[in-house]
Amino acid sequence: MMYDFSNKAYLVTGSTRGIGRAIAEALASAGATVGIHGRSDEKVHCVCDELSKSGKHVIPSPADLSDPESAADLVRKFARVTGHINGLVNNAGAGKAASFRAMSLEKWRATFSINLEAAMVASREAYAIMRGKNAGGIVNIASLAAHGPGKWMGADYAASKAGLVSITQSLAFEAARFGIRVNAVSPGMVETDMTVILPEENRKSLNIPLGRFASPQEIASVVLFLLSDASAYITGQVLHVDGGLWM
C-alpha cells in the first residue's frame, strides 16, 4: 500500500541499521522528512549521506540514549529543525542474552535505560509538542519477548519490552482526547545483523508457521500503516508481526 507523508516530520530512533533504518527509508520514500538517529555521529551522517543521494529528506539526529534524559534534547532539537514533529518511532534498543542467575542489577538497569526509559522520555517530549496540534502518532517497537519469557534475549530484555507495551497503552489512553494515537509492534524473528549468525538448524527448530524470518521492510510496512490515516481509528494496540510464531 502506498502512503503519502509529504510535509510531515518523523523521528525514528535507532535508525542507522536493521528495522529502524527500514522504517526511516520507507517514511522518507513516502515523502516525509525523517530524523536519522544513532549513537555514533559518524554513522548517522554516513546513513544520511546515503539516503540524501537518492533524494530522501533526512535530518542527522545523533544521541546516546544510554542516558535517557538525552532523549528529551533529541526530540526537541528535531522539532526545532523541522518546525514540528508529526510522529515518533521508538525503535532504539539493546539486549544481550544472559541467564537469570547471572543477571546483575547494573545490566538490568542498562537495558531498561535504553529500551524503556529513553522511549518514555522521548514519548513524553513528542506528546507535549503534538498536543499543541491535536494530532500525531507514536509507534513503539516492542518484541515477541514482551509477551512471555525472555527465552533468547533474557529477563531484562523481556521485562523492558513488556514495560514498553504497558506505557504504549497508558499513553494511548491519555493522549486519545488530543487526537494522538499510540500503538506498538511486536516483531518476532527478523533478518538483521543480530540474527544472521543463527545456524539453519536453530532457525528450523523455531517452527515459525510461515516458515521464515521477517524482512525489516515487513516490519516497516506495519509501522507506516499505524502512522498513516489508514489506521485513524486504531490506538492502544499491539500488532504481532511474527509469522505466526506467538500463535
Image (cartoon, rainbow, N blue to C red):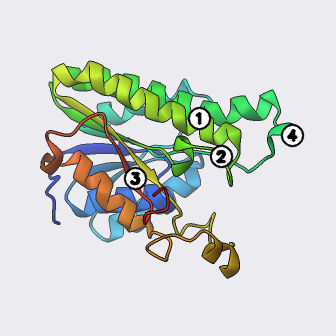
Q: Can residue 84 be seen in this view?
A: no
Q: Which of marks 2 and 4 is in front?
A: 2
Pointers 3 and 2 in contact (CB under 8 A)?
no
Q: How crowded is mark 2: few (under 14 residues within 10 Å), some or many (20 or more)?
A: many
Q: Where is residue 186 in the image (x, y as percent from the top left)?
A: 44, 49
Which residue in the protein does label 3 denote?
240
Which residue in the protein does label 2 denote?
150
The amino acid on which the numbered mark 4 sits, given as a three-letter code, is: Ala
Furthest toward the right, the residue is: 102
Label whose residue precedes the other's in the sequence (1 or 3): 1
Pointers 1 and 3 in contact (CB under 8 A)?
no
Q: Nearer the viewer, residue 233 or 107?
A: 233
Q: Is residue 43 above or below residue 100?
A: below
Distance Cα–Cα, label 1 vs label 3: 17 Å
Screen quadrant of the C terminus: bottom left
Task: Identify the secondary structure beneath mark 4.
Answer: helix
Label whose residue precedes the other's in the sequence (3 or 2): 2
Q: Which residue is drawn at 63% across and 63% down?
A: 194
Label whose residue precedes the other's in the sequence (2 or 4): 4
Question: For residue 102, which numbered disc appears in the image?
Answer: 4
Q: Which of marks 1 and 3 is in front?
A: 3
Q: Position of residue 79 (x, y in %)?
A: 31, 32
Label whose residue precedes the other's in the sequence (2 or 1): 2
Pointers 3 and 4 in contact (CB under 8 A)?
no
Horizontal relation, residue 244 to residue 87: left or right: right
The amino acid on which the numbered mark 2 sits, given as a three-letter code, is: Gly
The amino acid on which the numbered mark 3 sits, given as a three-letter code, is: His
Distance Cα–Cα, label 3 vs label 2: 16 Å
Horizontal relation, residue 130 to residue 106: left or right: left
Q: How crowded is mark 3: few (under 14 residues within 10 Å), some or many (20 or more)?
A: many
Q: Is residue 2 above or below residue 70?
A: below
Which residue in the protein does label 1 denote?
160
